[in-house]
Image: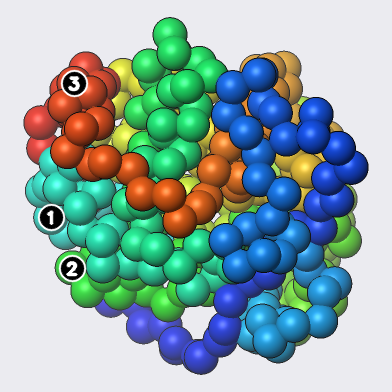
């Protein structure tokens, strides 16, 4: 099956508006210190700020919101569930991210492996006994390899950015919600109601999310029979689902297990977002530790 996707040009996503009122707000569990601004001196994810990024952000989300339909997501999941592109270790895949810079990320212009290690080391500092969480942090963005030719070289709008459910109404809390009006599903009565094709409290596992690196890495872990706890897989799959874990949207689709797992996503998000910096991690120093975790929770080589 061959899927051809147009690759329009776009810029980069901006930061979440966050005002830090005092030094106490900078601490997470008394360990990792949250910065007051990103590496460029701006607030995190401020979508209202006028800047050189604003036009690029709108172009990115306009393209994303028009094209992320139920049919597109079904095709992507069917294609990539085959896991027939390459066999590769987790660490080798991490190294490939040296060639990837997320153009939707306004907070860091370093290769993605730097972000993975920064997130993992920040969490390791505050949760030293939760090794599954350290590894989850290391691999949460590995799905961004979809941008590379060997993995299909998908356009950025089909790999990065905030995620959201398809198959039901698009919540107004989603960034640049106005562009969904051009999505074919927007006028489809089967998809444009509160529940759409789903039932109340059906569980997020039964909900199709917009396609991107989150869902791909979740599929990779599942299909390769990772022994990470279910909450780790939940974090991987929903860490970009800001409409839920920041705005509280779509809770009517969650079951009890989702509600418990969401607490960990909200913890994780602080490290994912605020650990980005120009401070480099000594890769060779920490590599043996993360290799031991990979060996514990994954097979030596994975199908991708």
Image quadrant containing the N terminus: bottom left
Horizontal arrangement in the rendering, residue 200 relative to residue 131 (left or right): right
Q: Contact (CB < 8 A) between labels 1 and 2? A: yes
> At numbered mark 2, what does the secondary structure look like: helix, strand or loop?
helix
Q: Nearer the viewer, residue 224 or 53?
A: 53
Select label 1 or label 3 by which is in front: 3
| 10 Å crowding of disc 2: few (<14), some (14-19), many (20+) | few
* Residue holding disc 1: 86
Q: Residue at x 42, y 83 (%)?
A: 5
- The residue that label 3 is drawn on is 292
| Along the line of sight, the residue nearer the viewer: 155 or 78 | 155
Q: Where is residue 51 in the image (x, y as percent from the top left)?
A: 74, 82
What residue occupies the far front of the structure in this picture?
A: 23
Q: Is residue 165 shown to the viewer in this render? A: no
Of callouts 1 and 2, the N-terminal one: 1
Work out whether residue 30 or residue 129 is closer to the camera in this orientation and state it.
Answer: 30
**In the foreground, 82 or 283:** 283
- For disc 2, the marked residue is 150
Which numbered disc, 3 or 2, marks the residue that appears first in the sequence? Answer: 2
Which label's residue is closer to the chain start, 1 or 3? 1
């Amino acid at each position: 099956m061959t899927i051809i996707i147009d690759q329009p040009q776009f810029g980069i996503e901006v930061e979440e508006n966050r005002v830090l009122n005092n030094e106490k707000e900078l601490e997470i569990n008394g360990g990792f210190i949250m910065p007051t601004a990103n590496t460029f001196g701006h607030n995190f994810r401020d979508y209202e700020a006028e800047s050189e990024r604003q036009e690029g952000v709108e172009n990115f989300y306009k393209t994303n919101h028009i094209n992320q339909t139920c049919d597109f997501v079904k095709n992507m999941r069917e294609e990539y569930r085959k896991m027939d592109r390459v066999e590769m270790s987790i660490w080798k895949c991490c190294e490939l991210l040296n060639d990837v810079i997320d153009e939707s990320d306004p907070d860091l212009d370093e290769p993605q492996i730097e972000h993975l290690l920064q997130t993992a080391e920040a969490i390791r500092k505050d949760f030293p006994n939760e090794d599954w969480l350290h590894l989850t942090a290391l691999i949460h963005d590995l799905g961004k390899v979809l941008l590379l030719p060997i993995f299909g070289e998908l356009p950025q709008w089909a790999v990065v950015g905030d995620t959201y459910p398809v198959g039901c109404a698009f919540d107004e809390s989603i960034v640049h919600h106005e562009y969904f009006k051009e999505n074919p599903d927007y006028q489809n009565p089967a998809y444009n109601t509160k529940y759409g094709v789903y039932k109340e409290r059906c569980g997020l596992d039964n909900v199709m999310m917009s396609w991107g690196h989150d869902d791909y890495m979740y599929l990779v872990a599942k299909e390769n029979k990772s022994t990470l706890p279910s909450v780790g897989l939940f974090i991987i799959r929903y860490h970009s689902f800001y409409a839920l874990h920041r705005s509280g949207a779509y809770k009517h689709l969650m079951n009890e297990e989702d509600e418990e797992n969401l607490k960990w996503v909200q913890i994780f998000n602080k490290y994912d977002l605020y650990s980005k910096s120009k401070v480099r991690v000594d890769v060779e120093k920490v590599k043996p530790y993360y290799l031991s975790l990979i060996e514990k929770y994954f097979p030596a080589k994975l199908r991708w």
